[in-house]
Amino acid sequence: MFITPAFAQTGAPGGTDMLMSLLPFVLIFVIMYFLILRPQQKKVKAHQELVKNVRRGDTVVTTGGLIGKVARVIDDSEIELQVAEGVKIRQMRGLISEVRAKGEPAKEEGES
């Protein structure tokens, strides 16, 4: 008596309605990609390039805050840092946060 019958709305079955409901989520993802993900990927590439180009004589800062001079490059994943006179430590290359000063590598004994 007090309830009126509900009539279904006419239109395309889920076509444009579904597209319009997904549009905000797509826009949010695109905005997140350009504001968050893409700059982070660039930063990671720049850090990998920095770590790859570390050589003997460079002054570096580690993620733990140690400042030292690269005494020797052991392999692709490790370097040897001189943190004080006569004190050398082994450090993972990936844990270098910044290169303070680029140094010239020491000449080998046979070079003039």
Image (spheres, rainbow, N blue to C red):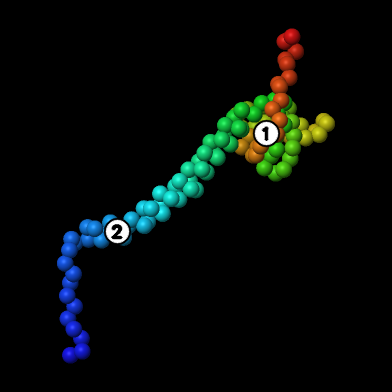
Q: Quadrant of residue 17?
A: bottom left
- The residue drawn where x is 37% and y is 56% is 25
Q: Residue at x 49, y 48 (%)?
A: 36
> Dot 1, how many residues are within 10 Å of its Cα: few (below 14), some (14-19), or many (20+)?
some
Residue 1 x/y as whole percent: 17, 90
Above or below residue 102? Residue 64 is below
Q: Which amino acid type corresponds to the residue marked 1 in the rendered image?
A: Val
- Residue 42 horizontal/vertical position (percent): 52, 39
Tag shown at residue 20: 2
User: Which dot marks residue 99?
Assistant: 1
Q: Amino acid at mark 2?
A: Met
Helix or strand or loop: what does disc 2 sit on?
helix
* Residue 92 is at least partly visible in this image: no
Name the mark nearer the viewer: 1 or 2: 2
Q: Let me know if residue 7 appears in the view.
A: yes
Please, is residue 81 above or below residue 107 in the view? Answer: below
* In the displayed structure image, the side of residue 23 where residue 109 appears, left or right: right
